[in-house]
Amino acid sequence: MNGKTPLVVVGDALLDRDLSGRAERLAPDAPVPVVDDCAERTRPGGAALAAYLAARDGRDVTLVAGVGDDPASRALRRLLEPWLTLVPLPLTGTLSEKTRVLAQDRPVVRLDRGAGRTREATDTARGAVRSAPAVLVSDYGRGTADALRDVLAARPPLVWDPHPRGGTPVPGTHLVTPAEKEAHRLAPPDGTARRDLHAAAHSAAALVRHWRSAAVAVTLGARGALLSYGEHPLLVPAPAAHHGDSCGAGDRFAATAAGLLADGALVAEAVEGAVATASAFVAAGGAAAVPSAEAGPARQPDDHDPYALAARVRTAHGTVVAAGGCFDLLHAGHVGLLQAARRLGDCLVVCVNSDASVRRRKGGARPVNPLADRVRVLTALACVDAVAVFDEDTPERLLADLRPDVWVKGGDYAAADLPEAALLQKWGGQAVLLPYLDGRSSTALMERAAEGAR
């Protein structure tokens, strides 16, 4: 057991296909691009993509979806079989296929075929939903959610990812996740054509009431997501703006949110995690970069692991810079020092004292900010690549493991105060002092705050 709650995904499965090549000329008989040397790749689509992504996260997943015996259905079964349990529902027609033709990784045209719809529910499918620890509905409007609507209404799902062709979420759904355009189309009209943050907030609040759901999160692409419980919304910004291929980002968002809620996260925590994961998904190439079914689970590099980061930089013959301190009340002097330190190399690892270490150095009244808060603030700085924590009075043991090329301290230290300098020399590193901005210090900030309080 990996500690993750099993998930049942109910929805409409598709087969997605990408034909990727180069376009360097127009056809002689029509002003259309000629895409040469196309490579073909198939992957699960729709609810099948959401289920596949959740399964690749290490979760035990069951997919309830309409799947037949046509060539597309058989291809989808082969993609899903190693990763999850499929509970097929009878399909009228053939499985829907979506084929994108891409040139230089940009879509040129999309070809759709197959209009299969789920015909009816089965006792096996009903039993899977009734006994599910957690349910995600991915409704692409092809009948699966409708066929199981009575069971879903009796046991409202954690997350419902709606689409304009689908039905309304059942009342009591914990979280509904429409995209911005979908929210505006699905919400009761408000007499305005606005498509800004105000309009998104209005649509989200209206949909909470209209659908009688606990919460609605409107996904805003590169801007993140707006979470509403019916009144004042919470804007969850994306950690970075990525403008790559967003195909599949909604499925990634819904699968992540459902998994986090299943594991006990609060709705706001689930939305925050889903925004971060969907943003990283787009940055990595979107659905086009989803690992193939044959590829085993790959451990993603942790960009916040200071030791892994230092190893990667050294492998690329770069310079690892480290800086240390308590960083209790972060001020302009700290920021200037860290920005200058980052310019000395290819990555900056900040070595920060634990709470116990700060108390031993500065007394029982410190730190003002606990370790978790100090690490979060430091990590948010663009010049900081990773944070490492040490519990001793000096960071020598940490530095011996990290082995930076440059060790930076603020200019209010003297050479005699830097026992780390001799340590750095053992592997050819260099300790340096950088000047603080004059008159900036945490102690001075605390004294001014105390004066103001009096």
Image (cartoon, helix red, strand yellow):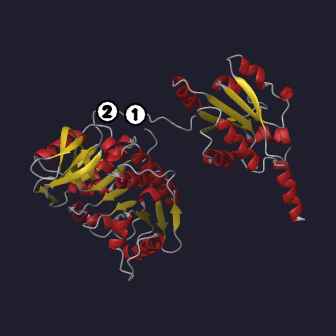
- The residue furthest top is 426
The residue wearing badge 1 is 298
Picture residue at 68% right of the left edge, 36% below the top: 341
Q: Nearer the viewer, residue 205 or 430?
A: 430
Quick check: 7 left or right of 382?
left
Placement of 347 over or under 425, stated as above or below: below
Q: Does residue 160 appear to the left or right of 276 in the view shown?
A: left
Residue found at the far bottom of this picture: 191
Q: Secondary structure at mark 1?
A: loop
Viewer-proximal residue among 247 and 115 = 247
Residue 96 seen by the camera: no
From the image, tell me which residue sits under label 2: 295
Q: Which amino acid is tagged 2?
A: Ala
Quadrant (top left, top right, bottom left, bottom right) of the C terminus: bottom right
Rendering coords of residue 410 (x, y %): 78, 37
Which residue corresponds to the image point at 39% horizontal and 48% vertical from the top-left?
282
Q: Is residue 109 visible?
A: yes
- Tell me the element at label 2: loop
Q: Position of residue 415 (x, y in %)?
A: 84, 27
Residue lying at the far front of the rendered structure? 28
Please provide percent x and percent y for residue 374: 69, 47
| Circle 2 Cα neighbour tier, 10 Å, few/some/many (<14 / 14–19 / ≥20) | few
Name the residue rendered at 64%, 26% in the picture.
Answer: 402
Vertical position of residue 88 compared to residue 416: above or below: below
Quick check: marks 2 and 1 in contact, CB under 8 Å?
A: yes
C-alpha separation, residue under disc 2 versus residue under disc 1? 8 Å
Q: Amino acid at mark 1?
A: Ala
Residue 300: x %, y % from top left? 45, 36
Q: Which mark is residue 81?
A: none
